[in-house]
Image (cartoon, helix red, strand yellow):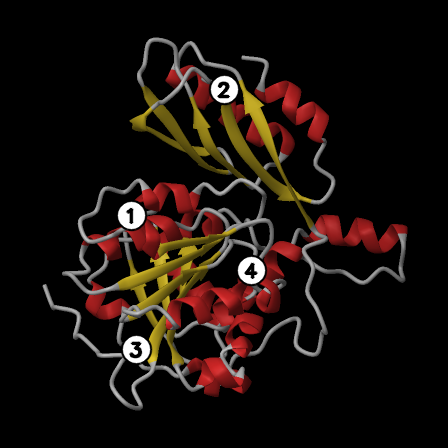
């Protein structure tokens, strides 16, 4: 395995490199980041995690990773919004605080929300006090290949025709496709993740679809569980903050981007009788209400460990990840979907088992 070449941010004129990891909900960003940290080989890497919603799951997952050389203080979590919307209020003060540490990080990795647009974040690195001390080493965009193969981001011609028939003046837009494409358009490296879930023909079709969306040739890698050598992820030397014109966006020219097209809320769930039955129930509810993302934790009767759940559509993964503490065995799930989710019905359905 290749080693990560060290840099010294304290050296005169040397900027701290920053890697931005983006990708739609459930693409595997946190898993890739965890794999990266496990191979850091002693290098000081600070992590900034941003989530859409009030309950931070990914930051907690990383803080409990148990990876040697990955102290909790190097995991900084920003919640209740996307970086593209809260740059001035949350992101810039966080980055300044990292820079001003007595021993600043050698590399910073930012994991954006699955609904974040990368370009406003890249623009923030043009701020004078940031620009002189940091540079965007590269933007890595993860792609959930099964979601692309299933047409999750494709337009539904029949639905569009019905909308236009009902109101000819209605401008068509596909919020999922816009976010997904904006994340690709900013990429320096595209990682096709979860490739073990598709056959070769399906993968080739996904690769062709992604290539057609990219404005210029980009390196594209296949991965399973986000497992890639850190040497191919860090050290891209893209200087993305100086290359914004080559990274078009559906929202170029907009003063501000709000995520009015998406809903997010937290549902509490009681202690469960069976982990398997609970996960099967979650998959059923996700399909019934067209939920994009379900993630969180629950307690299972007779089990001292917490059950962590991650769901993308009806694809669910679960594992007992850490000991439960205290007497509270109430679980919490983050629900994310397109605007108009029936919150009351979803809460009732999730709590019904």
Residue 210: x %, y % from top left: 45, 65
Is 110 on the left or on the right of 215, as rendered? left
Residue 320: x %, y % from top left: 31, 26
Front-lying residue, 195 or 348: 348
Residue 158: x %, y % from top left: 72, 49
Is 2 on the left or on the right of 116, as rendered? left
Front-lying residue, 156 or 325: 325
Q: Which mark, by number, is residue 225? A: 1
Is 171 on the left or on the right of 312, as rendered? right
* Dots 3, 1 in contact, CB < 8 A: no
- Kindly identify which residue carries mark 2: 330
Q: Quadrant of residue 223?
A: bottom left
Q: How many marks?
A: 4
Separation of residues labelled 1 and 4 (CA atoms): 21 Å
Mark 2 or 3: the one toward you: 2
Mark 1 or 4: the one toward you: 4
Is 133 on the left or on the right of 53, as rendered? left
Residue 257: x %, y % from top left: 68, 65
Residue plotted at (61% across, 54% down): 176
Q: Which mark, by number, is residue 236? A: 3
Mark 1 or 2: the one toward you: 2
The image shows residue 325, relative to residue 44, as above or below, that is: above
Q: Earlier in the sequence, mark 2 or mark 3?
A: 3
Q: Quadrant of residue 49?
A: bottom left
* Dots 1, 2 in contact, CB < 8 A: no
Separation of residues labelled 2 and 4 (CA atoms): 30 Å
Q: Earlier in the sequence, mark 4 or mark 3?
A: 4
Residue plotted at (50% across, 49% down): 25
Q: Is label 4 in a helix, a strand or a loop?
A: loop
* Dots 2, 3 in contact, CB < 8 A: no
Q: Earlier in the sequence, mark 3 or mark 1?
A: 1
Q: Earlier in the sequence, mark 2 or mark 4?
A: 4
């Amino acid at each position: 395995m290749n080693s990560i070449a060290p840099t010294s941010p304290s050296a005169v004129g040397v900027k701290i490199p920053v890697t931005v990891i983006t990708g739609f909900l459930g693409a595997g960003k946190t898993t890739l980041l965890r794999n990266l940290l496990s191979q850091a080989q002693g290098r000081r890497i600070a992590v900034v995690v941003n989530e859409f919603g009030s309950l931070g799951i990914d930051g907690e997952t990383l803080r409990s990773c148990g990876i040697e050389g990955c102290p909790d203080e190097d995991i900084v979590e920003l919640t209740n919004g996307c970086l593209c919307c809260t740059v001035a209020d949350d992101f810039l003060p966080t980055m300044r605080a990292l820079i001003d540490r007595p021993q600043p990080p050698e590399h910073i990795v930012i994991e954006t929300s699955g609904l974040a647009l990368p370009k406003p974040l890249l623009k923030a690195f043009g701020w004078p006090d940031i620009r002189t001390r940091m540079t965007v080493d590269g933007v890595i965009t993860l792609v959930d290949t099964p979601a692309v193969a299933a047409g999750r981001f494709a337009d539904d011609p029949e639905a569009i025709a019905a909308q236009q028939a009902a109101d000819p003046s209605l401008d068509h837009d596909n919020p999922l496709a816009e976010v997904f494409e904006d994340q690709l358009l900013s990429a320096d490296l595209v990682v096709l993740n979860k490739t073990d879930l598709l056959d070769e023909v399906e993968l080739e079709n996904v690769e062709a679809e992604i290539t057609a969306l990219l404005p210029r040739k980009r390196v594209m890698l296949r991965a399973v569980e986000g497992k890639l050598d850190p040497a191919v992820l860090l050290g891209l030397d893209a200087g993305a903050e100086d290359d914004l014109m080559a990274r078009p966006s559906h929202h170029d020219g907009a003063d501000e981007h709000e995520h009015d097209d998406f809903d997010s809320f937290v549902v509490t769930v009681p202690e469960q009788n069976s982990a398997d039955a609970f996960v099967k129930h979650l998959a059923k509810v996700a399909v019934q209400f067209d939920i994009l993302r379900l993630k969180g934790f629950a307690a299972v009767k007779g089990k001292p460990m917490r059950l962590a759940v991650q769901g993308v559509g009806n694809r669910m993964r679960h594992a007992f990840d850490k000991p439960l503490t205290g007497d509270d065995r109430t679980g919490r799930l983050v629900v994310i979907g397109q605007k108009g989710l029936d919150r009351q019905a979803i809460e009732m359905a999730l709590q019904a088992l």
